């Protein structure tokens, strides 16, 4: 009988060694063929409520994916539970519709063991910030090489209109008939506070801006967190009208552009500066000391600046920043894990699983 050596060598050539043997951080191969938007559309019928913002996000996401220039089999989309979490069905790639709040945990295991994959997490404000809150913040602080898109509609849509962790205080819903008493989460503040290296915000109806943010997130090594304002026309219609309506948005939106002076309002007449106690305040550009007005720097390593930007949010959307708040490089979890395993292997050699399982910390009963 053959000892299988030849066959083993052939298999090894086709399937490389485990991910931790590689020194490179990102091993996503380039696609041999030029892919188009249609190649990322699955044969599943897209089913969301008429007018749902998820349609616009899906269309932008599918049209953006060819820019990654990777084979579809190296793209993985993992979701939790909620309306947004149906998205993996509609993209022609590998994916998983997982369980409530656990998408970041599943994505962590996958991205850590398979750096040859581009791993995206699709989640919502309820899925990510309620039952999934711990999984989200730990994925962010660990800097796992995954991209997290949080669709924020400020309501529980799939379960028919209860208030969510981002619903504004006083929100009247089926579960809060006299108004919500909870102080809502600010997803961007939470992400910055968890030391996420890349944090951004965009809007479902602004396709150009949404696509530019997705591109920046994809280019970031480590965890990229993107909050997307997403309209729910059935249970929370026009929740973001102040920043989506043409007559309103130009006065309220603060578009963040790297290395550019922060200007907003009519004809860019408003700017930002730090106040006495470190909070940002909007001031007229005319008459202000030019040196006191901020120029946006998402690459500032100290998160204080990005956090201050995130705190401009208010329930009336008076000053709402969109764009990349923070974009700072630091070693990713899978990079550190691979280096640690390689060091241990050099020092101690390959481990023995049987010896580990029956080691000194085991005993027999009876």
Image (cartoon, rainbow, N blue to C red):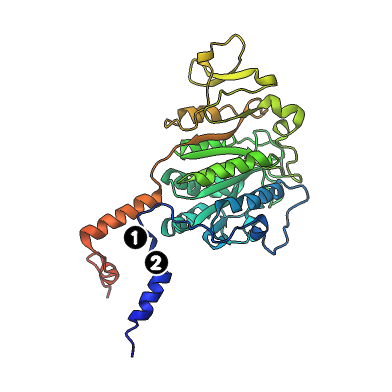
Q: Judge from the rendering whether residue 46 lies leftward or rightward of residue 103; answer left or right.
A: right
Image position, residue 322 (x, y; %) = 61, 33
Image position, residue 202 (x, y; %) = 62, 38
Residue 10 in sight from this viewpoint:
yes
Residue identifier under label 2: 16
Image position, residue 222 (x, y; %) = 45, 46
Quadrant assignment, res 177? top right
Q: Residue at x 57, y 11 (%)?
A: 288
Eyeballing the image, is 18 above or below 4?
above
The foreground one among 90 and 40 is 40
Quadrant assignment, res 212? top right
The foreground one among 276 and 180 is 276
Few, some or many residues within 10 Å of mark 1 (<14, 14–19, 20+): few
Quadrant assignment, res 5? bottom left
Residue identifier under label 1: 21
Q: Residue at x 55, y 54 (%)?
A: 69
Instruction: Find numbered disc 1 in the image and state the secondary structure of the residue it sits on.
Output: helix
């Amino acid at each position: 009988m053959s000892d299988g050596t030849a066959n083993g060598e052939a298999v090894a050539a086709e399937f490389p060694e485990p991910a931790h043997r590689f020194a490179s951080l990102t091993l996503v191969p380039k696609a041999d063929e030029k892919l188009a938007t249609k190649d990322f559309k699955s044969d599943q019928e897209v089913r969301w409520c008429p007018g749902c913002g998820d349609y616009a996000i899906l269309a932008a996401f599918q049209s953006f994916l060819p820019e990654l220039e990777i084979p579809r089999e190296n793209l993985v989309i993992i979701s939790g539970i909620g309306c947004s979490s149906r998205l993996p069905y509609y993209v022609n790639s590998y994916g998983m519709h997982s369980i409530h709040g656990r998408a970041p945990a599943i994505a962590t295991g996958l991205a850590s063991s398979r750096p040859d994959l581009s791993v995206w997490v699709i989640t919502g404000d309820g899925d990510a910030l309620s039952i999934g809150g711990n999984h989200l913040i730990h994925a962010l602080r660990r800097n796992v090489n995954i991209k997290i898109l949080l669709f924020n509609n400020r309501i529980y849509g799939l379960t028919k209109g209860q208030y969510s962790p981002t619903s504004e205080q006083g929100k009247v819903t089926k579960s809060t008939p006299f108004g919500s008493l909870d102080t809502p989460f600010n997803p961007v503040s939470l992400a910055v506070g968890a030391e996420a290296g890349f944090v951004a915000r965009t809007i479902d109806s602004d396709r150009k801006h949404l696509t530019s943010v997705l591109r920046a997130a994809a280019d970031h090594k480590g965890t990229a967190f993107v909050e997307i304002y997403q309209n729910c026309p059935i249970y929370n219609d026009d929740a973001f009208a102040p920043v989506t309506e043409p007559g309103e948005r130009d006065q309220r939106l603060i578009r963040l552009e790297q290395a550019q002076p922060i200007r907003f309002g009519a004809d860019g007449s408003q700017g930002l500066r730090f106040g006495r106690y470190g909070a940002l305040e909007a001031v007229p550009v005319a008459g202000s000391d030019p040196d006191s007005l901020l120029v946006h720097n998402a690459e500032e390593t100290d998160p204080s600046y990005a956090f201050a930007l995130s705190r401009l949010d208010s329930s009336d959307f008076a000053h709402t920043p969109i764009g990349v708040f923070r974009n700072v490089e630091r070693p990713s979890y899978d990079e550190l894990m691979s280096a640690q395993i390689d060091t241990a292997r050099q020092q101690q050699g390959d481990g023995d699983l049987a010896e580990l399982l029956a080691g000194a910390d085991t005993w027999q009963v009876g």
